[in-house]
Image (cartoon, rainbow, N blue to C red):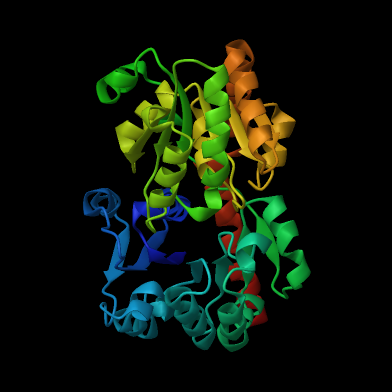
């Protein structure tokens, strides 16, 4: 089986999709499949050293330059003539094409060439169809959908959702393509708490209580709720620090700093920027509690990572795996409300034994449902079914 992944960018600043794409590709490659990835340049730097790790393992990664890079629309939509040329000449080599996201040039052009060359393709919308995001920029999206996107979706061999909740939220669109639900997975042996790493990278936070937000600094992540909630929590819990660990992609951090100043908690909030590899494990090892009060989250891979590190979690009911977390007793689920977020965090910070028990249940949940090996095997089986069905229909 020859598999092509198409993704707008492989910058780790985009969080879940980059991680999922690379690690799933590696897992499929280890099973003996030929895997290639097409991506374009990014406004942010791509970490070439991390990409080279995957390339050295035998995964072919093509990163195409953006055409007219200085033109805003070209950059924003990841427009690339080189990608067009590659797809037109090479897409027929593949048995299946897996496409990340919507409303950008790479997914649009790869869907077009897959149909033109009669190659089955799967679209993973990555939350783009969630009602909260679907409503944004609706006038532009309406045009894009009429011209391209509804055809791309309806003609797909399948649509991949990563949570039942995500699939249910999209159902009012009445898309014609079949769909399946397979969650993201992580490499479990990587996520082991390590106090030595915490000491190495964050010595200044030793013996302090840490409330950890580990995600992009982005408008949809509920930081406008978390900052006032933390101001309330700080009044009840002494020696508590809020660590905001993640990249600031769109300059949203300036708004966040404004709220921090407004609530006079500058001395208790720490921005770390994007953390990868050992530094990521270090901060997860150090934290007392993980919080993610997002307005929308198609999956929430950071939640899985936190649970794998035996951290209790406080998440909003807009994180699409909230039902699984609640049923497992791995954390507390709240609405997007300042008081609810504060009360939940205070409850677990004041009861470390309860938080510890939830953390252990979280690890068990990840082991049972979110291992990379299990999720990749499920995806592999879907690929095979789609390819066989396509051959028989053809």
Quadrant assignment for the C terminus? bottom right
Q: Is residue 13 or residue 245 the one in the foreground?
A: 245
> Toward the viewer: 296 or 373?
296
Q: Could you tell me residue 128's position as x and y percent?
A: 58, 64
Of residues 175 and 138, the one drawn nearer to the viewer in this rendering:
138
Place of residue 109 in the rendered image (x, y in percent of width and height, measured from the top left): 45, 81
- In the rendered picture of this protein, how many numbered marks are placed on residues? 0
> In the rendered image, which quarter is residue 281 located in?
top left
- Residue positioned 39% across, 59% down in the render: 250
Q: Residue at coordinates 51% horizontally, 38% vertically from top-left?
A: 227
The answer to whether residue 214 is visible is yes
Residue at 61%, 53% (x, y): give it: 296
Coordinates of residue 144 in the picture (x, y in percent): 56, 83
Q: Is residue 92 above or below residue 12?
A: below
Residue visible at 44% across and 16% down in the picture? 239
Judge whether residue 371 can be spotted in this image.
Answer: no
Residue 32 sits above or below residue 244 on the image: below
Q: Position of residue 275 (x, y in %)?
A: 33, 39
Q: Left or right: 194 with respect to 127?
A: left
The residue lying toward the viewer, choosing from 353 and 263, is: 263
Relative placement, left or right, of 306 versus 9 is right
**38 relative to 238 in the view: left or right:** left
């Amino acid at each position: 089986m020859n598999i092509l992944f198409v993704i707008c960018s492989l910058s780790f600043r985009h969080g879940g999709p980059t991680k999922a794409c690379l690690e799933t590709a590696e897992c499929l490659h280890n099973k003996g499949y030929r895997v290639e990835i097409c991506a374009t340049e990014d406004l942010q730097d791509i970490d070439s050293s991390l990409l080279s790790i995957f390339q050295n393992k035998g995964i072919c990664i093509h990163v195409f330059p953006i055409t007219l890079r200085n033109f805003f629309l070209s950059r924003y939509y990841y427009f690339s003539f080189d990608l067009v040329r590659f797809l037109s000449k090479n897409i027929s080599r593949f048995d299946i094409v897996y496409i990340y996201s919507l409303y950008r040039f790479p997914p649009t052009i790869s869907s077009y060439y897959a149909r033109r060359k009669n190659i089955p393709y799967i679209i993973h919308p990555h939350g783009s169809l969630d009602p909260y995001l679907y409503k944004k920029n609706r006038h532009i999206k309406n045009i894009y959908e009429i011209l391209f996107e509804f055809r791309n979706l309806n003609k797909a061999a399948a649509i991949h959702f990563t949570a039942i909740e995500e699939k249910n939220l999209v159902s009012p669109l009445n898309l014609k393509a079949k769909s399946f639900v397979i969650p993201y997975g992580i490499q479990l042996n990587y996520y082991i708490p390590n106090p030595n790493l915490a000491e190495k990278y964050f010595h200044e936070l030793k013996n302090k209580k840490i409330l950890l937000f580990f995600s992009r600094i982005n408008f949809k992540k509920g930081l406008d709720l978390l900052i006032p909630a933390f101001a309330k929590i700080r009044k009840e819990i002494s020696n508590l620090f809020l660590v905001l660990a993640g990249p600031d992609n769109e300059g949203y951090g300036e708004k966040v700093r404004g709220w921090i100043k407004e609530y006079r908690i500058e001395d208790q909030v720490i921005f770390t920027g994007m953390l990868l590899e050992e530094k990521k494990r270090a901060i997860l090892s150090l934290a007392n509690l993980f919080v993610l009060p997002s307005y929308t989250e198609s999956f929430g891979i950071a939640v899985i990572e936190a649970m794998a590190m035996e951290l209790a979690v406080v998440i909003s009911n807009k994180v699409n795996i909230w039902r699984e977390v609640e049923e497992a007793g791995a954390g507390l689920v709240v609405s997007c409300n300042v008081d609810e977020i504060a009360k939940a965090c205070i409850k677990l910070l004041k009861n470390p034994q309860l938080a510890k028990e939830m953390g252990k249940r979280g690890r068990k949940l990840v082991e049972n449902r979110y291992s990379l090996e299990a999720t990749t095997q499920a995806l592999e089986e879907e690929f095979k079914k789609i390819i066989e069905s396509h051959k028989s229909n053809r």
